[in-house]
Image: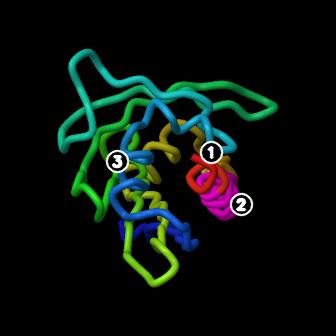
Amino acid sequence: MGVPCLSYAESIVIARSPGALYDMVSDVTRMGEWSPVCRACRWDEGAGPRVGAWFTGRNELPERTWETRSKVVAAEPGREFAFQVRGDWARWGYTFTPVDEGTRVTESWEFLPAGIAGFEERYGADAQAHIANRAEAARTGIPATLAALKQVAESE
C-alpha cells in the first residue's frame, strides 16, 4: 500500500535531571497537568511504567471527548518513555538527554500505518482530513506540552 507514516518531534531544555523528568512523564496519571488534549490517564489495575503495561487516556477538545487505550513500548528510566495508542495506531515518545543546563526532553509523535488504515476504514473519503487534523494537533500540541512540562518541572 505504501502509506507514509506521519511524524513530528520537538525538544526543550528543562533544568531538571533526566531521571526526575522520566519519573514525571512515565507517571501517566500526571499527563493532564501538561497536555493540552489529554486530560487524564489511569493505569490498568496493577500496571505501571513498564513495557507491556496498558493505560486509558481521556482526551478533550472543544468539539468532543474520547478515550484511548495505550500500551507502553519503551520504559528506560532517565532515557526514554513511549507508548502506542490502540496498540499500533500512533506512537508517542519522550527521550531525555543530559545537557549542561539540565535535560533536553524530546517529545515525538508518529502516526503509524495501522492508524492510517484504521482512519481510512473509519472515515472513508474524509480520512485524509481527519489524519491532517491529528497531525496538526501534534504539531501544535507538542510544543505546548513541552512548555507546560518545563513550567511544572522547574517549579517542583
Contact between labelled residues 3 and 2, with CB atoms less than 8 Å apart: no
- The N terminus, quarter of image: bottom left
Numbered disc total: 3
Which mark sits nearer the N-terminus, 1 or 3? Answer: 1
Image spot of residue 147 (x, y percent): 67, 60
Identity of the residue drawn at 66% across and 59% down: 132
Q: Residue furthest right?
A: 62
Q: Label 1 to label 2, Cα distance in Å?
A: 13 Å
* Mark 2 residue crowding within 10 angstroms, few (<14) / some (14–19) / many (20+): few
Q: Is residue 17 left or right of residue 15?
A: left
Q: Is residue 89 left or right of residue 123?
A: left
Give the number of the disc on residue 83: 3
Which mark sits nearer the N-terminus, 1 or 2? Answer: 1
Which mark sits nearer the N-terminus, 2 or 3? Answer: 3
* Mark 1 residue crowding within 10 angstroms, few (<14) / some (14–19) / many (20+): many
Q: Residue furthest top?
A: 45
Question: Which residue is more in the foreground, 7 or 97?
Answer: 97
Image spot of residue 119 (x, y percent): 52, 45
Identity of the residue drawn at 58% across and 43% down: 124
Residue tagged 1: 34
Q: Label 2 to label 3, Cα distance in Å?
A: 19 Å
Q: Which residues are magenta?
A: 132-150
